[in-house]
């Protein structure tokens, strides 16, 4: 698996991702990025910051219609606004202490929040809580599938977590490299230029 990582790193370089000022901002971004592109999320986050709403208490108590307008650019804005309020209430109730909890307990809590699926929960765990949980996104699935590796979310996650050191920074960089490679190659259908295709499982 490290051969895939080293191959992507050599091509793309360090990604230094996830861009955020606070752990809460990471959580907000993880929820907003569902079914949209990151540049839309950046715009929504900027909108929220301009209204001084990038704090759990302020966002939890904000008028839903105001939030809807601020995150409209990410799509499904009514749904996302409602879910942002729910998540903000969770952060407001528990504070930063939630990040001191064991990974699986934190994951269970997050998955119980409306609108938080496995990818969103694991993004929060990895990038906000700084705990080792490998994130499987659509690009990772697509790339692995092209390499002849398939499975559900948990199965694919297990492959990485079983074969890699439990290194938070490694997990972050690896996930970011998959995303960037997916955007540059998969999204643009540059399959003929792919440095991974044809090598398949020998990279693992």
Image (tube, rainbow, N blue to C red):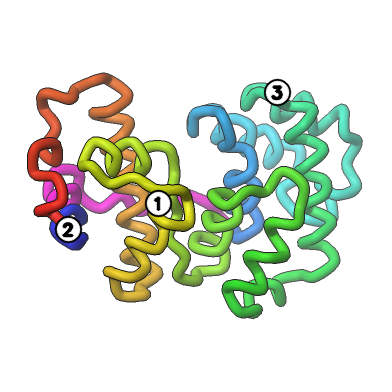
Part of the protein shown in magenta: 7-21
Are circles 1 and 3 on residues that touch, CB within 8 Å? no
Residue at x 66%, y 73% (from the top left corner): 105
Q: Earlier in the sequence, mark 2 or mark 3?
A: 3
Q: Quadrant of the C terminus?
A: bottom left
Task: Provide the residue designation for mark 1.
Answer: 17
Foreground of the two, 71 or 77? 77
Q: Position of residue 77 (x, y in %)?
A: 73, 26
Residue 99 shown left or right of residue 11 in the figure: right
Q: Position of residue 21 (x, y in %)?
A: 56, 55
Residue 9 highlighted magenta (yes or no):
yes
Task: Provide the residue designation for mark 2.
Answer: 204
Task: Provide the residue designation for mark 3.
Answer: 72
- Count neighbours of disc 3 (C-alpha within 10 A) and say few if under 14, some if 14 to 19, many if 20 or more: some
Residue at x 60%, y 72% (from the top left corner): 104
The answer to which quarter of the image holds residue 163 is: bottom left
Are circles 2 and 3 on residues that touch, CB within 8 Å? no
Foreground of the two, 113 or 177? 113
């Amino acid at each position: 698996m490290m051969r895939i990582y080293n191959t992507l790193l050599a091509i793309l370089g360090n990604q230094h991702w996830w861009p955020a000022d606070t752990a809460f901002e990471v959580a907000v971004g993880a929820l907003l990025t569902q079914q949209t592109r990151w540049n839309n999320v950046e715009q929504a986050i900027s909108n929220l910051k301009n209204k001084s709403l990038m704090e759990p208490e302020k966002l939890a108590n904000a008028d839903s219609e105001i939030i809807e307008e601020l995150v409209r650019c990410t799509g499904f804005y009514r749904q996302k606004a409602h879910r942002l309020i729910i998540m903000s209430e969770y952060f407001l109730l528990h504070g930063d202490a939630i990040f001191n909890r064991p990974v699986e307990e934190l994951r269970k809590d997050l998955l119980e929040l409306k609108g938080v699926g496995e990818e969103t929960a694991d993004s929060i765990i990895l990038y906000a809580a700084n705990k080792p949980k490998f994130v499987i996104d659509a690009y990772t699935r697509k790339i692995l599938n092209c390499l002849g590796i398939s499975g559900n979310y948990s199965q694919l996650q297990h492959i990485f977590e079983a074969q890699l050191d439990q290194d938070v920074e490694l997990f972050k960089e690896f996930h970011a490299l998959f995303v960037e490679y997916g955007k540059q190659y998969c999204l643009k259908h540059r399959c003929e230029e792919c440095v991974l295709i044809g090598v398949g499982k020998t990279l693992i």
